[in-house]
Image (tube, rainbow, N blue to C red):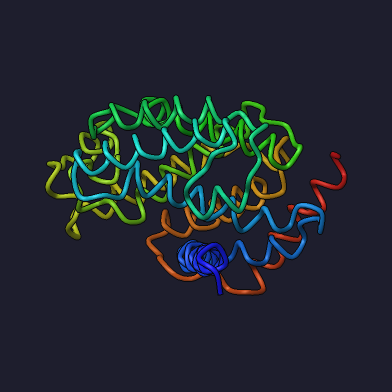
Amino acid sequence: MTSTEHGHRDDAQAVVAFIAKWRAREPEMAFAEVFCPRTVRARFGLWGALVFEWREAAFELSDARPTEVKCSWWADESLRCAQDAPRHPLTVALSMPGLPWHALARGLSAMADAEPSRPVDREAALASVAPLADAVAMVEGALFDAPSAEDAKRAVAVHLLGERLRIGLMAADGGRVPLSLLARHGLRAQDLSGPQGEPAACDWARELAAALPSQPFDAALYRRACGAFDGWHLRERAAGRTRRMPSLRALTLAWRSARQATRTG
C-alpha cells in the first residue's frame, strides 16, 4: 500500500470516528438521516460532525485560550475550503469550495475573539452566538440547496444555546443562563451548578424552546429535524427531566420534518 493509499484509509477512518462522536451526542439525528434524499445523504453525517466540531471549539473547551486557538484554526480551515485546499478529514470528504466558507470563517473568528459571558436576557444570549449561528445557517442552506432564512438562523442559535445548557452549567459562563433568570430566582452565579439552580435552568430551557421558530419553517431537512428534536429536549428540560429521546418519538419527529420539507419544497 502506498503512502497516499495509507493517507486515504486513515482519513476515511477518521471521518467515521468524527461522525460517531457526533451521533453519540445527538443519536436522534440518525432517524432524520433516513429521510434525507439519497443525492445528498452522504453530506448529512459529514455536516453533523462538522457542526459538532465547531460547537465544541466555540463552547465546550476548558477556558478561553483553547477556544481561541481552536476557533482560529477552524476559521483558517474554512478559508482553505474556499480555496479548495482543506486539511481536516471532514472538510476533505465534503470538498465543496463553492459554499459560503468566508462567512463561516468570519463567524468562527468572532467566536475566537469573544469573551465567555453571562448574557442579560434571552435576546442577548441569542445575539452572542449569532455570528456563528448565521454563518452555519448560510453554509447549511447552500450545502443542501435550501433557504437560509431568519428562522433557520434562529433555530441554529437556539441549538447552540440548548447544547450549552446541556453541558455547561458548571462552566464559567454558567451554561449561558441569563442574568435576568438569576435575579428572578435570587441566585448567585455559583448556585447554577447545584440543586438550587435547577429552577433557573428549567426556566432557561423553557425560554429557549419558546424562541424556536414554529414548524414548519424554511430550512433544510437537517435543520427542521434538529429544531424539532431541540424543542423536545428543551421542553423535557423545562419540566425537570433529562432523558434520551425514545426511538419512536425520534422517528415520528423526523418523519414530520421530512413531510414538511416535501410540502413546502
Say left or right for 257 vs 58. right
Label tally: 0
Observer-nearest of 97 and 132: 97
Front residue of 174 and 98:
98
Q: Nearer the viewer, residue 183 or 125?
A: 125
Horizontal arrangement in the rendering, residue 236 relative to residue 148 (left or right): left
Location of the C terminus (image quadrant)? top right
Q: Is residue 169 above or below residue 20?
A: above
Q: On screen, 114 above or below 46? A: above
Q: Residue at x 51, y 63 (%)?
A: 7
Measuring from the top left, give residue 155's x and y in whole percent.
56, 38
Q: Quadrant of the N terminus?
A: bottom right
Image-quadrant location for residue 263:
top right
Where's residue 64, x and y in %?
20, 39
Q: In the image, what residue occupies the spot 48% across and 62% down? A: 18
Left or right: 173 in relation to 90: left
On the image, the x and y values in percent for residue 148 come to 66, 30
